[in-house]
Image (cartoon, rainbow, N blue to C red):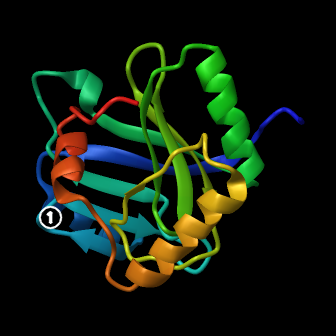
């Protein structure tokens, strides 16, 4: 199998104190477009190229002033293929990388993991499906690719227009207490 590789930086997420103020700044001053948002979860998805990339920037309510390690919500890296995602899954397992979660966002298959200092990162591959965000379906990368993609497509078709979220799990993840794989 070929060595997996990152194609480019996908998006960055930031925890913020004042979500509305930050959204207005990045929308009205920087010029990003809001592509989706969820007031209950405190999430705003933004992009400079919404036809190419659903979001390049994510704002998350809940910056913790007592713990500066949680200022950056995540750093995400886009991959060129599903094979890259499976390759990273194998590599991370072999090297003892701590997983946060593995999920389909309908429009992407993602592995969330932690760097050595505990910063949350993500590698993802775009599926080609459209899906309103937030969208989170837990996946198992021990599943064969064909079976996994059938499940991803099924959920994307069923919930793509409305989004799909286990709100209790998302709320825990936003607080930094997500279930560990």
Q: Position of residue 85 (x, y in %)?
A: 67, 44
Query: Which residue is label 1 attached to?
Result: 20
x 11%, y 65%: residue: 40
Considering depth in this image, is 30 or 96 the residue closer to the camera? 96
Q: Position of residue 8 (x, y in %)?
A: 68, 48
Considering depth in this image, is 57 or 135 the residue closer to the camera? 135
Residue 63 sits in quarter: top left
Considering depth in this image, is 3 or 61 the residue closer to the camera? 3
Q: Work out whether 117 lies above or below 33.
A: above
Q: Work out whether 92 lies above or below 14.
A: above
Q: Position of residue 117 (x, y in %)?
A: 41, 14
Q: Is residue 84 left or right of residue 42?
A: right
The outermost residue toward the bottom is 161
Image quadrant in which the C terminus is located: top left
x 84%, y 32%: residue: 3
Q: Position of residue 103 (x, y in %)?
A: 45, 51
Q: How many marks?
A: 1
Q: Is residue 111 left or right of residue 164?
A: right
Residue density around tag 1, few if under 14, some if 14–19, many if 20 or more, within 10 Å: some
Q: Is residue 28 left or right of residue 115?
A: left
Asked if residue 30 shows in the view, the reply is no
Q: Work out whether 171 lies above or below 53.
A: above
Image quadrant in which the N terminus is located: top right
Asked if residue 150 shows in the view, the reply is yes
Residue 118 sits in quarter: top left
- SS at mark 1 in the image: helix
x 21%, y 69%: residue: 38
């Amino acid at each position: 199998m070929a060595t997996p590789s990152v194609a480019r930086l996908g998006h960055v997420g930031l925890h913020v104190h004042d979500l509305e103020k930050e959204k207005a700044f990045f929308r009205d001053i920087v010029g990003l477009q809001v592509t989706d948002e969820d007031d209950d979860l405190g999430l705003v998805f933004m992009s400079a190229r919404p036809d190419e990339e659903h979001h390049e920037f994510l704002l998350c309510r809940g910056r913790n002033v007592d713990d500066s390690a949680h200022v950056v919500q995540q750093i995400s890296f886009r991959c060129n293929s599903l094979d890259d995602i499976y390759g990273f899954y194998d590599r991370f397992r072999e090297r003892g990388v701590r997983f946060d979660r593995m999920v389909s966002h309908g429009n992407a298959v993602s592995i969330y993991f932690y760097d050595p200092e505990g910063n949350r990162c993500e590698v993802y591959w775009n599926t080609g499906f459209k899906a309103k965000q937030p969208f989170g379906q837990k996946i198992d990368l021990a599943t064969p690719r064909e079976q996994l993609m059938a499940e991803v497509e099924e959920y994307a078709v069923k919930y793509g227009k409305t989004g799909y979220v286990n709100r209790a799990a998302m709320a825990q993840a936003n607080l930094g207490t997500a279930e560990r794989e």
